[in-house]
Image (cartoon, helix red, strand yellow):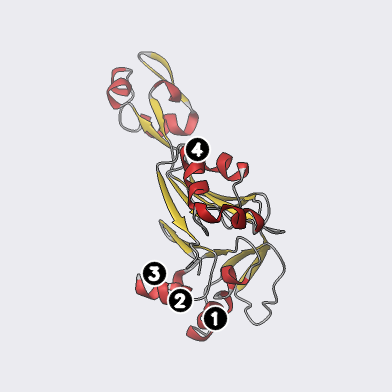
Amino acid sequence: MPSIAIKYESELILWDCGEGTQRQLMKYKVGYGSIDHIMISHPHLDHYLGLFGLLETLRLSSPAPRPVNLFVPKQLDLQDYKFAKLSKLKNGLIYRGKNFTISAFPVKHTKNSFGLVFQEDDKIKFHEEKAHSLGVHGKLFKEIQKKGKIKTDKGEIKLQDITWKNPGKKIVYSGDCSFDDNVLEAARGADILIHEATFDSSKKQEATERSHSTAEDAAMVAKKAKVKQLILTHISPR
């Protein structure tokens, strides 16, 4: 069942929490006790059936479990889990971490269905040779980052004169959806697109009727969005 773990620096994020999530976390040595955020893409059981078991494990494992931020598209009864801070999953920015953001966007599936985007902040890199030639050395690097410009014996130097942006990594998750322009737009230029592929192309009509995607749909989105890597998920055993 669906669940995706993203570890970024000191934060651990789960996208969906299907049945068997705890087993997979243990299999791949991802400590469930260090989960910071859980985001449920839509209110179908296969995407959150493992949630209550995971929360119960966390409750029993410590007299004071670490807080977990839980983002869900509809209200859940979590009164037994005071350590879980409940927030509504909605369109737009839902969380800003240290050097990254997570946003949600609506998709065509069922009511309150969303895709998710992990976006690392761009990083400023220095053209060191150019900076040195313009008199920027040592402590002046920190000063120009703080002030945006400084004066040297070469004149006024602006931060953009000696830097370039290294784009942050981008990971996009479609959740469950039929072929959707919203996913295409969200996925543009992504490093990784995790896209559902419930059916193959021989069951295109059934996929459309049930608001799911085929593997061909996922490949088309990845190609049009020019993503670097496509990962297929939510594949039907049929």
Q: Is mark 4 on a helix, strand or loop?
A: helix
Tell me where residue 143 appears, x and y as whole percent.
Answer: 42, 31
- Residue that label 4 marks: 225
Residue 16, which numbered label? none
**Of marks 2 and 3, which one's residue comes earlier in the chain?**
2
Q: Tell me which corner region of the image, top left, top right, bottom left or bottom right, holds residue 85.
A: bottom right
Q: Contact, CB < 8 Å: mark 3 with mark 1?
A: no
Query: Does residue 47 appear left or right of residue 131 in this picture?
Result: right
Q: Nearer the viewer, mark 4 or mark 1?
A: 4
Q: Is mark 2 on a helix, strand or loop?
A: helix
Q: What element carries label 3?
A: loop
Question: Residue at the location (37% across, 29% down)?
Answer: 140
- Residue that label 1 marks: 53
Tell me where residue 187 appears, x and y as whole percent.
Answer: 52, 42
Question: Does 51 appear above or below 153?
Answer: below
Between 132 and 10, the one nearer to me in the picture: 10
Between 78 and 211, the one nearer to me in the picture: 211
Question: Residue at the location (59% across, 56% down)?
Answer: 207
Q: Distance between the residues labelled 4 and 1?
A: 37 Å
Residue 22, which numbered label? 2
Tell me where residue 93 appears, x and y as whole percent.
Answer: 62, 48
Residue 30, which numbered label? 3
Kind of residue at disc 4: Ala
Q: How far apart are marks 2 and 1 (CA)?
A: 8 Å
Count neighbours of disc 4 (C-alpha within 10 A) and say few if under 14, some if 14 to 19, many if 20 or more.
some
